[in-house]
Image: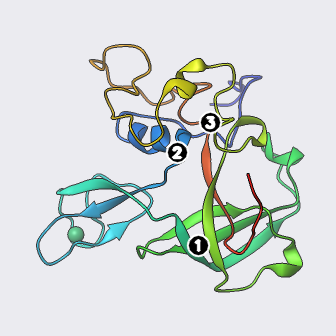
Amino acid sequence: MRGAARSTARSDVPEVDAFTRPYWEAAAQGRLLLRRCRAEGCGRAHHYPREFCPYCWSEDVDWEPAAGRGTLYTWSVVHRNDLPPFGDRVPYVAAVVDLAEGPRMMTEIVGCPEADLRIGMPLVVDFRGDGDAGPGDAGPGDAGLADTGPGDAGPGGAGPGGPRSRDAGPGDTVPGRAGCVVPVFRPAGNSVAG
Ligand SMILES: [Zn+2]
């Protein structure tokens, strides 16, 4: 598929489909979701989200809010990335974080100088919206997010303004809403207010 690149192509914004929509809508509200298996004798959480449990293959898996805490498993400082918009962000810290619930999560560390990174350091989740905005600033020109009570919006209430009769196809992103806020992690010890 060469030559089909759009001028607006971005490599940091996920493609939201019907299955992952709850995850990205929660992220837009500042909440990190996990998937947890409900099969008897398993009960393990996993990440990234899958429609079946990767440990026992049960399809009895549901979303649950994560505590948003973790520890740093490993990291790599990225100094070059030609995929937009990462080129404007280098250097950044790509990392794998051990979540408190067990799963390992590919993410990015923010708010920590490279020299201060330590294996096992405690981290807390943060959320980056468009333009590196923090949570609460995540809705670029969209009043819908501001009107949504944090943690109160169910899947029906947070819908993108239309009936949910159609599944989102691959590549059917939702610019300016879910999908533009991604979970990142920062040191838990930071006493930065606001
Ligand atoms: Zn399982």
| Amino acid at pointer 1 | Val
Q: Give whichever of 30, 52 is nearer the camera.
A: 30
Give the x, y percent position of residue 123: 63, 72
Ligand 1's quadrant: bottom left
Question: Do labels 3 and 1 touch, CB within 8 Å?
Answer: no
| Amino acid at pointer 3 | Cys
Label 2, on which residue?
Answer: 27
Q: Is residue 192 visible?
A: yes
Label 3, on which residue?
Answer: 180
Label 1, on which residue?
Answer: 97
Where 99 falls versus 121 (above or below)?
above
Q: For the view shown, which residue lies furthest in the top direction?
A: 162
Which type of secondary structure does the marked residue at label 2 adopt?
Answer: helix
Label 3 or label 1, whichever comes before in sequence order: 1
Which type of secondary structure does the marked residue at label 1 adopt?
Answer: strand
Neighbours of disc 3 within 10 Å: few (<14), some (14-19), many (20+): many
Give the x, y percent position of residue 22: 39, 40
The quarter of the picture where residue 166 lies is top left
Seen at 33% across and 35% down, the residue is 154
- Please tell me whether mark 2 or mark 1 is closer to you in this view: 2
- Report the number of numbered marks: 3
| Amino acid at pointer 2 | Ala
Q: Give whichever of 20, 25 is nearer the camera.
A: 25
